[in-house]
Amino acid sequence: MLQIFTSTVSDGSMKPLGKDDVDRTSKSRSDFLNAHGIRPSDTTCVRLGYNSDNYCRYQTVGVTHRGDGIIRPSSLIVDGLVTAAANHALFLPLADCIGAVVHDPKKNILMVSHLGRHNLEQFGGTKSVEYLVKNHGVDPKKLSVWLSPAASKDHYPLFSFNNQSLHDVAAEQCIVAGVLNEHITSSPIDSAADNAYYSHSQFLKAKRDDDGRFAIVATMK
């Protein structure tokens, strides 16, 4: 059984934005995970990096990666993580971008992939699915895809894609890779309009008092 949980502002910021935030963020993460019956020591964080021109970096993680980025510093810089193990949770902090949860219920394969502007301009939706096909032998027609809350095109249009929304472009790229349209679910929540979610873009526009990150976590039980 696949479980997906999304934090809100009330859970606290899920990513430290400075040295003074580390302890507070660690507690917020642990409290959020424990509240949903997920052990922090069984969770791996998708840690993004922008010091590269490659935004389609994916890795399959195993038992040695449990707790990485959660109970100890991150050892991985990736754009998406994959697990084939039950109770190995994948955690992704978000500002306004999409967290895509890609699941094969037959093969018990789970992927959490970051799909923001940088990733989508490199066709990260398509490449995420292609990684699963190449490395785990999945049939894309059997996959289900859930796209997290994200900023809508009214607040964050993708100029490279005719001002389409993050959700629309991500869904299109998954379909190109063979995912069936009816197997894709997009959250209706606009993180830039809903104050229950952190929005970095709105903070930069001085429309939010606090900067921060919400998060998604997914696990197979």
Image: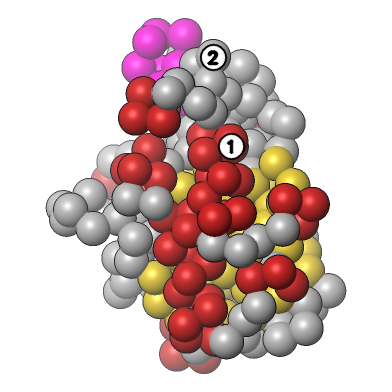
Question: Residue 4, percent across and down?
Answer: 73, 58
Examine the image and state in which quarter residue 47 appears: bottom left
Whether residue 27 sits left or right of residue 47 in the image: it is right
Amino acid bearing label 2: Asp
Q: Which residue was labeled with disc 1?
A: 167
Question: Taking 137 as reference, is 194 above or below it?
Answer: above
Side (left or right) of 73 relative to 213: left
Q: Which residue is drawn at 73% across and 31% down?
A: 188
Which residue is labeled 2 in the image? Answer: 154
Alpha carbon separation for disc pair 2 and 1: 12 Å
Task: Identify the colour scheme used.
Answer: secondary structure
In what element is the residue under mark 1?
helix
**Residue at 71% from the left image edge and 86% from the top image edge:** 107
Which residues make up the magenta segment? 198-207
> Looking at the image, which is closer to me, 211 or 103?
103
Residue 91 among magenta residues: no
Q: Residue at x 53, y 67 (%)?
A: 129
Q: What residue type is labelled 1?
A: His
Q: Is residue 67 visible?
A: no
How many marks overall? 2
